[in-house]
Amino acid sequence: MTGGRVLDEAYVEAVLALVERVPPGRVVTYGLLADAVGRGGPRLVGRVMALHGGGVPWWRVVRADGRPADCHEGTAGRLLAAEGVPLRGSGRVDLPVAVWHPDAR
């Protein structure tokens, strides 16, 4: 249970399947994932990633302002840089250059 609600297994699988498709060197936002799945929102996608995202390239999912995930002791930024994702001096991803748009539903 998460916040009194059980995550729908089909939703979890849909989110994770999209994250698996994000190419190295590119990123997707929580909101773009939610839009592509067709329901839920960025926070629900974040919950899916927090609970079930360890087996997919979780570091390729970033916030709408380009900030990488801050879990795993800040390793997301290093993993993104190693893949050649363009980062700004602030450590945020240069979204106009790096964003990957998942296919809608």
Image (cartoon, rainbow, N blue to C red):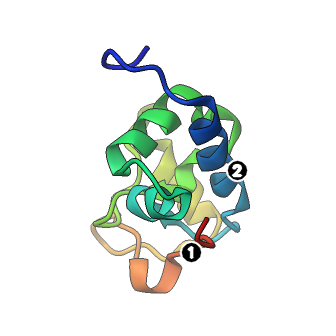
From the image, state whether disc 1 or disc 2 is nearer to you: 2
The answer to which of 9 and 42 lies nearer the viewer is 9
Distance from Cα at disc 1 to Cα at disc 2: 14 Å
**Residue 54 at x, y = what percent?**
63, 33
Which mark identifies residue 69?
none
- Count the numbered circles shown: 2
Q: Secondary structure at mark 1?
A: loop
The quadrant where residue 66 appears: bottom left
In this picture, residue 28 sits left or right of residue 30: right
**Residue 86 at x, y = what percent?**
49, 77
The answer to which of 86 and 101 lies nearer the viewer is 101
Whichever of labels 1 and 2 marks the residue nearer the N terminus, that label is 2
The quadrant where residue 46 appears: top left
The quadrant where residue 101 appears: bottom right
Tell me the crowding category of disc 2: few under 14, some 14 to 19, or many 20 or more residues within 10 angstroms, Cα based. few
Residue drawn 56% across the image and 75% down it: 100
Residue ID for mark 2: 17
**Residue 45 at x, y = what percent?**
45, 44
In this picture, residue 71 sits left or right of residue 83: left
Residue ID for mark 1: 100
Q: Amino acid at mark 2?
A: Ala
Tell me the crowding category of disc 1: few under 14, some 14 to 19, or many 20 or more residues within 10 angstroms, Cα based. some
